Amino acid sequence: MITVTRPALFAISMLMLAARPLGAEEIGSVSTVFKALGPNDKIVVEAFDDPRVAGVTCYLSRAKTGGIKGGVGLAEDTSDASIACRQVGPIRIEGTLKDGETVFKKDTSLLFKTLQVVRFHDKKRDVLVYLVYSDKIIDGSPKNSVSAVAIEKNWKP
C-alpha cells in the first residue's frame, strides 16, 4: 500500500495547478501521438484577451506533451506554437503601450521554460503586432510566430 503524506499531496496539487494555463481559455485540442500510459501528446488551441487592449483576442496553438510525465506536469513541452490575433470589438487602449510588453505567459516545463506573447505597436501603420516565442534560462528557441491587428477606427461587427 502506498501512503501519501500531506506535504507530498500539497506538492502534487501545486504541480497540477501550475500545469493549467492561466488567463487562457482552452478552445479545443487534437491528439498527435498515442501514449499507452497517461494522456496523448496533443496540439491545444487556447484563446486569451489582451489585458491592456480591449477588443483584441489572440488564439494560440501549441504543443502539449503527454505520457506519464505530461499527465503530472513534469514534461517539457516543445517550442512549437502559432498565434492569430483578431479584432473582436471596438479597440480601446488602456494607458500607454510599451513595445515588447508581455501580454501572455505560460510555463511549458516544471522549471525554466516559458511560452510568451509580447506586443508591439507599429505607430506608422497603426497596427498592433503580437509575437509568440519560447525561452529558457540558458537558451531559447528561434521558433516563433507573429500576428498583426490593424486598429480600425470605425469598427463594425
Image (cartoon, rainbow, N blue to C red):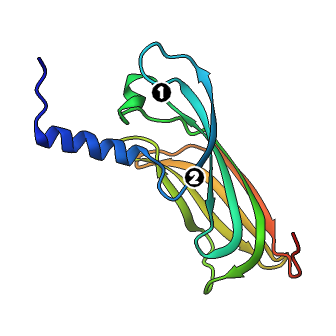
Q: In the picture, residue 111 is in which quadrant?
A: top left
Q: Is residue 82 visible?
A: yes
- In the picture as drawn, the residue positioned furthest to the top comes out as 36
Q: Mark 1 points at which residue?
A: 66
- The amino acid type found where label 2 is placed reads Glu
Q: In the picture, residue 92 is in which quadrant?
A: bottom right
Q: How crowded is mark 1: few (under 14 residues within 10 Å), some or many (20 or more)?
A: many
Where does the N terminus fall, quadrant-wise? top left
User: Where does residue 41 sit, x and y in percent of width and height?
Assistant: 54, 26
User: Where does residue 120 sit, x and y in percent of width and height?
Assistant: 68, 70
User: Where does residue 61 sit, x and y in percent of width and height?
Assistant: 65, 43
Left or right of 107: which side holds 49? Answer: right
Secondary structure category for the residue under label 1? loop
Mark with earlier residue (2, 1): 2
Q: Is residue 111 visible?
A: no
Vertical order, 141 against 58 (above or below): above
Mark 2 to mark 1 CA distance (whole Å): 19 Å
Q: In the picture, residue 96 is in which quadrant?
A: bottom right
Vertical order, 67 against 48 (above or below): above
Q: How many marks?
A: 2
Secondary structure category for the residue under label 2? strand
- The amino acid type found where label 1 is placed reads Gly
Which is more toward the observer, 65 or 87? 87
Q: Mark 2 points at which residue?
A: 25
User: Where does residue 10 sit, x and y in percent of width and height?
Assistant: 20, 44
Left or right of 70: which side holds 102? Answer: right
Name the residue: 42% across, 16% down: 37
Name the residue: 86% across, 81% down: 153
Name the residue: 55% across, 55% down: 24
